[in-house]
Image (cartoon, rainbow, N blue to C red):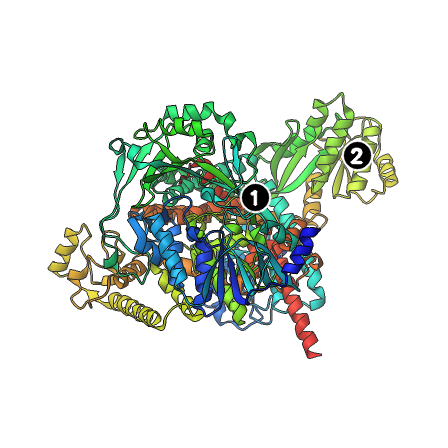
Amino acid sequence: MFDDTIAAISTAVSEAGISIIRISGPEAVSAADRIFRTPKGNRILKEVPTHTIHYGYIVDGEETVDEVLVSVMRAPRSFTAEDIVEINCHGGILSTRRVLETVLACGVRAAEPGEFTRRAFLNGRIDLSQAEAVGLLIGAKNEYALRNSVSQLKGSVLEAISRLRGEILHVVAGIEAALDDPEHYSAEEMADRLRENVGGWQRQIRKLIDSAQDGRMITEGVRTVIVGRPNAGKSSLMNYLAGADLSIVTEIAGTTRDVLTQTINLRGVTLLLTDTAGIRRAVDKVEKIGVERARENARGADFILYVVDSSVSLDESDQEIMDLLRTEKKPALILLNKTDLVPVTTEEALREELGRYGLSSLPVLPVSVTGGSGLGQAEDKIIEIVYGGRLSVSEGLTITSVRQKNLLVQAAGSLEKVSTSIEMNMPEDFLTIDLMDACDALGAITGEQAGEDLINEIFSKFCMGK
Amino acid sequence: MAERTENIQRDKVIEDQVDVAVIGAGHAGCEAALACARLGLKTVIFTMSVDSIALMPCNPSVGGSSKGHLVREVDALGGEMGKVIDQTFIQSRMLNVSKGPAVHSLRAQADKAAYSRTMRQVLENTPNLRIRQSEVMEIITEEGKITGVRIRSGMILPCRACILCTGTYLQAKCIYGDVEIYTGPNGLEAANHLTASLLDHGIRMMRFKTGTPARADGRTIDYSKMTEQKGDRRVVPFSFETDPESVQKEQVSCWLTYTNEETHRIIRANLDRSPLFSGVIEGTGPRYCPSIEDKVVRFADKDRHQVFIEPEGLSTNEMYIGGMSSSLPDDVQVAMYRTVPGLEHMEIVKNAYAIEYDCIDPAQLKETLEFKNIAGLFGGGQINGSSGYEEAAAQGLLAGINAAMYVLGKEPLVIDRSEGYIGVLVDDLVTKENREPYRMMTSRAEYRLLLRQDNADLRLTEKGYRVGLISEERWQKLCRKKEQIEAEIDRVEHTVIGGSETVQTFLEEHGSQRLKSGTTIGELIRRPELDYDTLSPLDPERPELPVDVREQVNINIKYEGYIERQKRQVEQFKKLEKRLIPENIRYEEIAGLRIEARQKLEKFRPSSVGQASRISGVSPADISVLLVWLQAAARRGETAGKE
């Protein structure tokens, strides 16, 4: 917890800018050496002077992951007062993630929220007067990570991991119950079950790792909500954005049947697009509820797309939405739709109205979704807003997903060890050691803490005697 | 008011001061008192009845999975339980021998009467130790320190330390059917006054429950319908000091039979008469030791449950009906027991019953088993919310040692989770929310590959020696053993063996692959099908070594990979254990801690960051916040020091 080597993405992930992956700890330099190659392949970081920058590539085996600049700062003259290597990647969520994954594969641990700051403080790099602020920051970062880590997982994935963990835990409990009460239970039965199942578990985890690889596991992306009055063209916009790129990764039924969420890859940016149109249709008669649901969605969003119908005049719903934009203070793009029809609400009228809500700084673009005009600019604008600093995709999202994948890899490794131990004919009590490690790794993804889980499982499923 | 005045006058009657007063003479009390007296302190042990010293009110056995480890550890530290059971066992088995060495565990059937008598003789013949039959009514403190105890007659016995080992006696109530009897186990007098005094001193109490099955007249049991369970051919003693030859003797058998649908039908039909289900019993019972009615309800899909018939001793016909504890009415008990094959005509000598008793919330204890809020007051055994003779003995010994260290002004003895099952037991008690009597289990020990019963001496005897409970002679013997183990491991790892025809034939004969190139004896030991002893024909240079040394060499080489892994985990664990938290820490001042964490930390007031990290509801982030705060406090302290 104190002196191992940790890594994390230390900048907000963005498409346009450069992202920095920071590695800190005693193994930082040697870990970086394993994956960094200079163009001529002649330089190793272990030998370079401190506080120097080097150009080269991050490689994963034979494959080049990214072109990078790497800076080396040796202890104690670094942010954490430990050896630090910073990898400046070309950016982009995907490549940044790949680099981080490559680093983590070298036995480096994913940093806990706020851990760099904690180390910096513990190593005397941060002024004493900042102690309280550091404490608060760690607490807050962790709260954020907690809130995000599970909510990011697709429901079905969460369920699959949780079920898998439950199965493993049950087998461990069965073996442990037999070890603790050999006169009432025999470990053989559970060991047989283990032998039958361990291969299947490994396959399941491998599948999950694959799905983590291509992003199917995690609902990662910019949470984007489309709002607007009925018939303003929200569904058409949704269909357009979805159709614009056929690499729609997944379709998720949200918490309510009425909310339609799609993961859309827009020029490398992943948008988690929620169309609130469905809401309106489903609860047409109870308009109030519809607005409330839109509000709820908007509250959880990173970015709002507001569609205005230019062929009719602004109405009460538009006022509700503007009020919402004002209170939520979220980055937003306003699309004045249906420019191919006779304008009733002009751009000027709309801007004037927005001004009354203090929203004049929001960008407005005239488009015709069905007519196909202005859509290219709209896409440009979305990308600009997402990566132009107006919207920060928090490091939390990427980091958590990398950590989750890393935990899956760990669980797979533990099960691999179980298989080896079974082949070596090790007694059952050795098998449970690695099985519990697998459970712990899976539990760290789902937020289920081992703690008393095992003891509870033993007591509830196995009748211990005396 | 009259009584109060009387009490004040009685205050004047004072007995001679002692160093340590031990309240209760069960398995915890005996170990506690012996430890203090052997360390040279003037010690008195109170018991409700001298005839119930070291009583086994429930099962007639010592040890078992993980409990056997505890007995070994007690012995390694200089305790008594292992020696007494070695003298008084009537059957012994090593459990789990087909499993890894970490879960091998000794269990012995005891001759209960002989066990009690032998322990009583040890107590009676220990210098500095006095036995006193009386109920202790009150503890007396001054300025947060224990100063004495008041006994039934009203007399005050001044003492410097006091150890509570009251077992199941505090406001004890025995229950079966609609019968409620206010006695301790086995009809013994309950201790009805001390709870109030503890409450007066701000100690939080809980009410726990446990139970015991019936004892049958052995002459009325038909053993021909049961499966015989014999002891091991070669008995291994509990104590590292017992001569292994002295425990090879004739053993008696236990018997296995089963309940059936008829048993379960009778139980179900009478559930409404069970105090457990009618709500008469308020105490929390253990899930691991359910009554038979509990088993039938909770595991309804099981069509039978095992029943172990175990002798209570050589001088009695009483047989313990293991697996069928109950608090059903007497008549239902008779009917239900008689449905079991072999018990058709059984006569009950003592009926089954549940017992409720007061215990403390162990969150109030330090890892030394001293109360956080009263200096010199310690708790050991069932009063701390545990169950089992072995758990009690282990805590009694630790509490005894630490009471002595307190009186002598020496460093307390702390055993952590990586050093012994005792450490796991105590740490679980003081850092977890205990809602039922705590039983030791091997699955609770995360470093169990290191905490084997075979190496308890290597792990703990040094501590016992430093404390003063282990003789110089025993210590020197252990040092020699350690040297022999290390030297032999080193030799075996460096003894190269070539692929001669003798070697290849030998390997084939033992179902092992032929050698492709030279290797070491050590490498061959690691092969699953081989071990140290088997390889002796290939190892002509091998010195003559005692069996316990050979065992250690074998285990350490064979399981080296796993053992090394756990050792690395222990290193990490120790780092947080060493970060101590000042006793006067104010958690409400630490910004960034979540409210739940703050409340839990306030309740448990852990002594180290490691301990804090094991409290449920305290997250890793809270630990980070705590570390930052501690560091800041330390730096502030340094700055203040310089000024």
Vertical relation: B278 (above or below) B362? above
Q: Is residue B493 left or right of residue B149?
A: left
Residue A289: give x, y in percent of width and height: 75, 27
What residue is rendered at 72% in x and 28% in y? A233
Q: Nearer the viewer, residue B492 or A121?
A: B492
Which label sits in the foreground, 1 or 2? 1
* Residue A177 visible in the displayed image: yes
**Disc ID at residue A321:** 2
Query: In the displayed image of the protein, which residue is found farthest to the left?
Result: B501
- Looking at the rendered structure, the kind of residue marked 2 is Ile
Report whether B621 appears left or right of B529: right
Q: Quadrant of residue B543?
A: bottom left
Task: Assign a secondary structure to mark 1.
Answer: strand
Whether pointer 1 and pointer 2 mark residues with C-beta atoms closer than 8 Å, the reply is: no
> Which chain is indicated by disc 2?
A
> Looking at the figure, which quarter contains the C terminus of chain B?
bottom right
10 Å neighbourhood of mark 1: few (<14), some, or many (≥20)? many
Taking depth in this image into account, of A404 and B410 the one nearest to the observer is B410
The residue that disc 1 covers is B207
C-alpha separation, residue under disc 1 versus residue under disc 2: 59 Å
| x, y percent for residue A281 | 71, 23
Query: Disc 2 on helix, strand or loop?
Result: helix
Give me the chain letter of mark 1: B
Q: Dividing the picture into quarters, in which one does residue A183 lie?
A: top left
